Every structure is written in structure tokens, then in C-alpha cells.
Image (cartoon, rainbow, N blue to C red):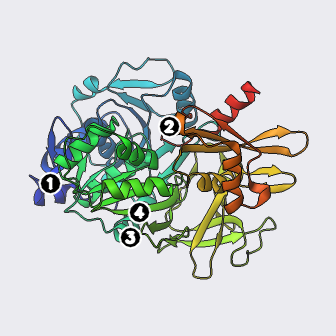
Amino acid sequence: MFIGSHLEKFSAELKEKPAIVTKEKVITYGEFTQDVMILQKKLNSIAKAGEKVALLMDDDTEFLSLFFAIIRNGCIAVPLDPKWTKNERNHALTISEPDFIITSNNFEHNEVFTVIHMDQLAREEGSEESLEHILSSESLFYIGFTSGSSGKPKGFMRNHRSWLESFDVYENIFDLHSTQSIISPGPLCHSLSLFTSVHTIQTGATLYVSPQFDPIDLYNWMTREKVDVFVGVPTMVEAITRANGFNTNNYTLKKIIVSGAGWSHNSISRAKERFPMARLYDYYGASELSFVSYKELTPEVSCSSKIFPNVKLSVLNERRMQCREGEVGEVFVNSPMLFTGYIKNDEETKKVLTKFGATVGDIGYLEGNGKLTLVGRSSNMLKSGGLKIFPEEIESTLKGLDEINEVVVIGVNDDYWGEKVVALIEWKHIDRRMTEEELKSYCQKYLSSYKCPKQFISRGRFSYTKSGKIDRQAIQREMEEEE
């Protein structure tokens, strides 16, 4: 079996059922399958199995039809972000080296890559030859790109099996099925939105597509349409819960599934108030690891998470020995959902796919009940006074204050401490800021003294990556320039 192999069946059994819904149109499974099969024939005349086909598209419905056509033909899809700068796009193209670029916008032609416009593809006569018979679960089908928050983006490779295995646990843990409607706002070039969209179509459910994120417009639309499931990152949910100007109070949303940076307690409380009928889930995963752990957010929930059923975890110390219960170490993952590697980057691949399991440098500990608690990421770790400090722990503590909108903890070079721990704070209301003494007193209640920030600095809005995560590198650079 491969991704997209169910489309003929859905076309026959669910012919009139909506597959994709936008604000402008509804595409049924019959129409979607026909579009995919027409594109497959046209692609047969220009692309061979195993070749890489980059997509630079403005229309998400065209993107999805083309994505399924590419991977069903045994080719490898390479989504490009239309919002990238020229340098970012050139970097992605350099490391992925696609055989073709198919675009619907005014892409700058060059001599290095073959560029085909969608209008040109539409004029292709096509070939009846089917390439599906060559596909296996081990066939590569997708190259995505990391967000680049810790350096230049890397191209990660996926085969059909890794996503099919991920689909199974995703459905079982979050109780997702074909009768539901699902929305994951954001560009489909981002792996979270793409995974959700492809899974929705793979299961025969209805996908709502909204490439632009306007919290009020999105909220009103999905409540009018009675969308069942929202999948996104914490910043999206927070933006919706804070926005004013809603036209409806029809709270029909049944599930909110969130991944990414830690979801603060205050933000979770606001989400429960805005969506009282919804069950809230938070999961930990990565582009390289897929799903690792999850928790349903209830009043009784602790900071620890359950492990996904087909995942085996080990927490190892610096000598690569098994950590004791409650002892902090690096998290290693073994599962059938792992990525294949980074394209043309064996050195970085070996750092992730090790003999101990796969790791992206996340730090945490296991409890006696087998649950995982994450502390932070090794690449973010600070060393102050010779002691290891993880910014995420301090940030999570400070986010417990109602006055704080967002906080980022960084290390600033210091002659005495080595790295001085500094908390940068974005306040909800500029006239309701706390004093430095109040902040220090609060931190001392919940953190060891060496973890308490030595300085608190008020900031405006922080820099974010295109996938909605705090851009620590950019913030660190800004601070260094100011210093």
C-alpha cells in the first residue's frame, strides 16, 4: 500500500462527498480523483519514477492534486514555500536538486532547473502508462524542510511507510475517522499542515483549507461550517482565543490538536473557555521523528506525556548510559515512523539516526509509569556558573503569570557567569507590567536559585519562524546587536 492508493475506491464509494472545502469552492472525492489522474497522465510524459518534482504553488487545491499525482507516479514531491526569500529558495533548491519545478506563479526562470508552469502542464497530451506498480512502502515520496530556527534549513526525506505508520497511530490516539471534518490552517509547504491534509484525504474525511491565517475570519468560518477538528500550533490557538469581533457563538469544535512549542497553562485555559465542547491534545514530535508522546489536557493533567503505542524511548546520559527514573538526559526514539535522513547531508543524518535510536537533541526524563517529561533542547541549553540550564523550563514557569503574553529566555555573555540568564518579556498590557523584584520573587518560588533569571527585559513582539515557532536565533542576534 502507498499514500494515495485509496483514491479510486473513494471516487467510487464517496463520489459526491466533499474532499476539500475552501471559502470559494467544494471539491468532491470524484472530482479530486479525476483531477489527480489527469495530472498523473500529463506528468508521465515529462517525469520518470524516482525523479524529484518541486512545487511552487499559490492555490492549495491545485497543490494537493499535483502532490498526489506526483507521489502516485513514483516521483518525489519537494514543496517550496512561496514566502521564502530568493536566498532561502535557492538554498532549498541547491540541497534538493529537483529535476523539475512546477509552478503556478511568476517564478524566476534560470538555467539550472527546468521550470514548468501549470498552464504549460495543462497543454501536455499525457501518457496512459501507469507507474503505480513500481511503488512500495519503502519508496521515497516527499522532501520537506526544517524551519531553520537553529540554522539553515535541512531537507528531510520521507518514505510511504513512515507516514502510513504515522497515520495509524494518529487516528487511534486522537480518534480521527472518515466522518469528521478537519482544518489545519497554514501553507501546505509546512509539514504539519501537509501531513494533516494528506492524512485527511487518505482516510476519506473532509479537509477544510485556509492558507491565510486570519483568526476572526477563520473562527467564524469554521464554526459556521461546523468543523470537527482543528490542528495547529499554540500561537494559532492563542490568536483565535484573544481576537475580538466574532459573529457566532456556535462552539461546535470537538477536538483541538496542537504541536510545536510548549502550550502555556493560561493559553490552554483560554482555549477551553472559547471552545468548551472541544477535547484538547498536545503532542511532541519532530519532522525527523514523527509522533513521540502526547497528552490530553484535562484539569488533572500533569506535565508528563504518554508514549505513542509503536514508540520505544530511552533517556541516556552523556556517557550514553541509561538514566535512572527521574534523571535528566537526552531522549532517543525507536519507531517505524522515523525519517529516512537528510538529503545530501550524511553528517547531520548520522547525528540523528544513531545506534541508540533517533534524537534531535531533546532533553527530558522518564517517570516510573513510563511517561515522558521534556525539559528542553540541548541546542538551547545555557551554562551559567558551570550549571546547565534549559530556557524552556524557565519560560514555562513565567508563562504562568497572567500579565505575560510571551517570554523568551536567552544567555548573554558575562565575565562572571559565563552566560547570564536573561528573560525577555512581552507583556499583555504595557501598563500592567510587573517589577523586576516581583518577577524574581515569583521565579524563586518555583525554580532553583541558579535557574532564576539575573535580568528581565521588556520587549515588543518577538520574531517567529514561518511555521509559527519562536525564532531563538533571530532574537539572540537582535540582543547581541543591541549589546
Q: Residues within 10 Å of mark 3 (few under 14, many from 20)?
A: some
Q: Earlier in the sequence, mark 2 or mark 4?
A: 4
Name the side, left or right, on which 244 lies relative to 154: left
Give the quarter of the image for residue 120: top left
In the foreground, 236 or 284: 236
Viewer-nearest of discs 1 and 4? 4
Q: According to the image, label 4 marks what residue?
A: 281
Q: According to the image, label 3 marks what residue?
A: 173
Residue 429 is tagged as 2
Extreme residue in the bottom direction: 368
Q: Element at badge 1?
A: helix
Query: Which image quadrant: the C terminus?
Result: top right
Q: According to the image, label 1 marks what residue?
A: 11
Name the side, left or right, on which 257 lies relative to 382: left
Q: Earlier in the sequence, mark 3 or mark 2?
A: 3
Q: Residues within 10 Å of mark 4 (few under 14, many from 20)?
A: some
Q: Residue at x 56, y 33 (%)?
A: 463
Kind of residue at disc 3: Ile
